[in-house]
Amino acid sequence: MTETSHDRLLIIDFGSQVTQLIARRLRELNVYCEIHPYQNVTGAFLKDFAPKAVIFSGGPDSVMREGSPRPPSEVYDLGVPILGICYGQQVMMHDLGGRVEAGEHATAEFGRAYVTPTDGSDPLLAGWFLEAREQVWMSHGDHVAEIAPGFEVLGTSPGAPFAMTADPARRFYAVQFHPEVHHTPNGKTLYENFVRMAGFEGDWTMAAYREEMVQKIRDQVGDAKVICALSGGVDSSVAAALIHEAIGENLTCVFVDHGLLRLDEGKEVVGMFRDHMNLSVIHAEEQELFLGELDGVSDPETKRKIIGRLFIDVFQKYADQIEGASFLAQGTLYPDVIESVSFSGGPSVTIKSHHNVGGLPEKMGLKLVEPLRELFKDEVRALGRELGLPDSFIGRHPFPGPGLAIRCPGEITREKLEILRKADAVYIDQIRKHGLYDEIWQAFVAILPVRTVGVMGDGRTYDYACALRAVTSVDGMTADYYPFTHEFLGETATRIINEVKGINRVTYDITSKPPGTIEWE
Ligand code: XMP
C-alpha cells in the first residue's frame, strides 16, 4: 500500500488479463487507484486502505468452483460504491444472494456484443445509450442467472440478460462486459460516472505520480547507490530522470555502446544526459566485445542471448567499480510485464526473448528498481514531459535493446552495420522532413542478407537490398504498417540508393503485427 493524500480507489484483482486497463482508465480520469490481488485483501486491509470506492476485476475462474477467488465479506459493509466486472459481477451476485450458472454454448459470449437499455435513469448511465445500443466487449463462459435482492437490470445483451445491473440504494453496480477495453468504445464514460458518484475529485495527476514515485524510490533505495542502464530510449531516459530526482548523485548511469547503435546515437545520448541534465554517465565503449562475440552468429535468439549476457557482464563490471552500488534501475514498462509473464506467474510462450523482466541472473547480486513498471508508453511520455525532458527525446521512436543486431537478419558484419546506419539516417530524415515522425510509432531500415543485381550509370551493381519498416501502434503489442504515399516511398528509395553506397534495392514492408512482429528478428 502506498502513502498518499489522495482519495483512493481499490481494484481487487481476480486475475483478469486486462485488470491493468481498469487502472489506466481511472488514471485517465485522474483518480488514484491501486490494484491488489484478492488474496491480499482482508478485512483489516480494507480498514487500513479506506477506499472511497472498490472495483472487482474480471478473472478466469468460476464462482461455482469450491475455493474460487472472493473478496472479504467486509467489503460490502464499507458503505462505498462497488463496481463488479465480468467475474466481479458474478462474485457480487453470488455473495449477495443471486445465482450464477455454468457456461453453456448458448450463453457464453466472447468478443463484440451489443447492450440495449432497460432503464435509462440511473446515474451510471449518463452519456450512455445516446444511440439505441452500445457496443461492448464480452468474455464470459458463466453467466448470472438470477440477480441478487435489491438489484435491478439496467441493460441486456443477447447472451447476458443481466449485462448491466445496479442496486442504487447501496450504489453497487455490476456489469458482465469489460468497460475498460478499447472494444467497449464508450466504456470510459461508465468509469467516469462511477467515480463521480463515489465523490472523486480527479486530483491525481502525473505531477502527483512523480511525487509519489520519488518518495517510493527513496524508501526503496535509502542511501544505497543505483546503477542505471541508460539506452537513450524514452523508457530508460525517463526512469533515469526520475531516479535522479529521487536520489541525485547516488545514481550512476551506464550507457553501453555495443556497436549496434544508430548514427551518432552515442554522442547524442551521453551529451544530453551529462551536459543537459547533469547526470553522472559512464560511456562504456564495448563495441569490440559485442561485435567480437556476435561474429558469425546468425540465429536471432542466439544473438539476443549473447547481447543480453554481455549487457549483464558489462553492468556487473561497472557496478563493481561503484562502491555500494546495490540496485539496478530498469525502464521496464507494463506491456513488458504482461507480454513476458502469464497470469499464473509462469512463463508464457516465448515469441522473442527480448524483455528484461525476469531475465537477470541472480549472480548479479543487484536488486531491481523499476519505477515505470505500472505505466504504459504514453504515460511514460507524459511523465517525461513532467520531468522536463526535451520533446525531441520524449517523442523518440522505441529502439530495441539489441539495437541494429535484429535489423540485420543473418550474420552481422561491420560493413553491413555501416550501410544500415547510413540508410536508416536517410530514411528517418525523410520521415522528419515530411512531418510524419510523430504519426509513426516506429520506423527503421533492415538490411537484408541478400545482394541483388542493379544498374547504375552504365555499370552493373551487386549490392544489398534493404527493407523500410514503419508502423502505427498504441502499445507495440499490435501494429499496422504506415500507409506512406507512393511519392514518399519513391523519393526515399531514390535518396537511399543515391546516398548510401552498398544498397541498390529498397523494399517496403507492409506486414501487420500479428502475424508479423515489428522488428525483423
Ligand atoms: P516486436 O518485434 O516484438 O517488437 O513486435 C515490439 C517492440 O519491442 C521492441 N523490441 C525489443 N526491445 N529488446 C528490447 O528492448 C528486444 O530484444 C526487442 N525486440 C523488439 C521493438 O523495437 C518494438 O518496439
Image (cartoon, rainbow, N blue to C red):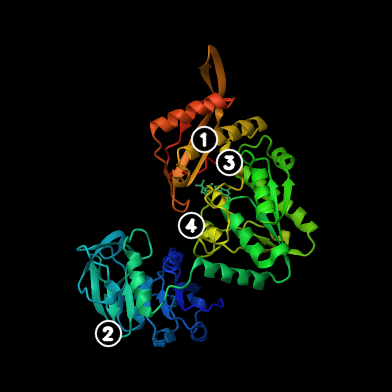
- What's the distance in space between the residues labelled 2 and 1, CA to CA? 63 Å
Foreground residue, 18 or 264? Answer: 264
Q: Quick check: can you spot residue 140? A: no
Residue 378 badge: 4
**Which quarter shows the C terminus?**
top right
- What's the distance in space between the residues labelled 1 and 4, CA to CA? 24 Å
Q: Amino acid at mark 4?
A: Asp
Q: Quadrant of residue 267?
A: top right
Q: Nearer the viewer, mark 4 or mark 2?
A: 4
Q: Amino acid at mark 3?
A: Ile
Residue 111 location (% of width, % of height): 32, 58
Task: Bin the neighbour count of mark 3 within 10 Å (Cα to Cα): few under 14, some 14-19, many 20 and up.
Answer: many
Q: Amino acid at mark 1?
A: Tyr
In the visual, does 292 lie left or right of 406? Answer: right
- The mark nearer the N terminus, 1 or 3, is 3
Residue 298 location (% of width, % of height): 61, 36
Q: Is residue 296 above or below residue 7?
A: above
- What's the distance in space between the residues labelled 1 and 3, CA to CA? 18 Å
Question: Could you tell me which residue is drawn at 27 percent across and 85 percent down?
Answer: 149
- What's the distance in space between the residues labelled 2 and 3, CA to CA? 59 Å
The residue at label 3 has a CB less than 8 Å from ligand 1: yes
- The mark nearer the N terminus, 2 or 1, is 2
On the image, numbered disc 2 is attached to which residue?
150
Q: Nearer the viewer, mark 2 or mark 1?
A: 1
On the image, numbered disc 3 is attached to which residue?
406
